[in-house]
Image (spheres, grey):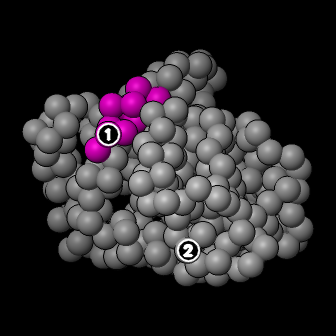
Amino acid sequence: MSESSPLRESAPNGTTHFGFRDVPVEDKVSMVREVFDSVAPKYDLMNDLMSLGIHRLWKEAMVDWLRPRSGMRLADVGGGTGDIAFKFLARGGMHVRVIDINREMLSYGRDRAINRGILDGIEWTHGDAENLPLDDMSVDAYTTAFCIRNVTHIGKALGEAKRVLKPGGRFLCLEFSEVTAPALRQLYNTYSFRVLPALGERITRDRDAYQYLVESIRKFPNQAHFAKMISETGLAQVDFRNLTGGIAAIHSAWRI
């Protein structure tokens, strides 16, 4: 597990984690939505701050591993800004459905697509990772980047990924993870907890949003534990690749 307490999706008293805080299960979705409503106008900047600008290379690495092909249909969950969708289409993918629970993020992504002249092959859908508005076995691939740690029930979201994938379909998840190099771990912890919230306050006037995002990373399962969770959904050939010393990781699996 990450360095904080073990992952607990929900407790007997009906609470779950929101960063390091315990909150009622029914409140988490709206609380997460408020965070992303706040950061949506500067979401790219937020990811630059949280990853020291390297998130762009990480996303390229995930699309490289996906290997888009002609005729491939993708569900990109939590991808409201369009980063993965744009890369997928540029590499030859046929159609991508971007699904996000946050309307502000979808609006931002749609505007980016229009500005880039990307009008075909992409669909923007308001929806929940735990209850996807997709038919069973309807997509060739499922991607999610920096989203799944924010859902209330990770296991349910993984089950939905399996449900919508066709047999032979690919699952890929890019997420912040557990740093593996001791020297880098200390440096990253100092940056995350001491520097990043202060930068968030200065740049976006929202320290609390950045504090939550940092804490949510520490509450997310480490690479091996998350791989086990993916396997438990029935997805097969689970694997992961560490990026930048484990600051992030890409998990891969298949629906057989």
Type of amino acid under label 2: Ala
Task: Give the image location of residue 76, x and y in percent.
Answer: 62, 55
Q: Is residue 2 magenta?
A: no
Instruction: For residue 191, say whether it is visible.
Output: yes
Left or right of residue 64, residue 186 in this image: left
**Residue drawn 74% across the image and 53% down it:** 161
Q: Write down the region rendered in magenta.
A: 32-42
Q: Could you say whether the residue bearing mark 1 is in a helix, strand or loop?
A: helix
**Residue drawn 49% across the image and 60% down it:** 117
Mark 1 vs 2, N-terminal side:
1
Left or right of residue 141, residue 39 in this image: left
Left or right of residue 91, residue 109 in this image: left
Type of amino acid under label 1: Pro
Where does the C terminus fall, quadrant-wise? bottom right
Other-residue count near label 1 (Cα within 10 Å), few / some / many at <14 / 14–19 / ≥20: some
Instruction: For residue 141, say whether it is visible.
Output: no
Which quadrant of the figure has residue 75?
A: bottom right
Mark linked to residue 41: 1
Left or right of residue 51, residue 156 in this image: right
Which of the pair 150/71 is nearer the observer? 71
Which of the pair 148/9 is nearer the observer? 148
Task: Give the image location of residue 58, x and y in percent.
Answer: 42, 72
Mark linked to residue 90: 2
**Residue drawn 54% across the image and 60% down it:** 118
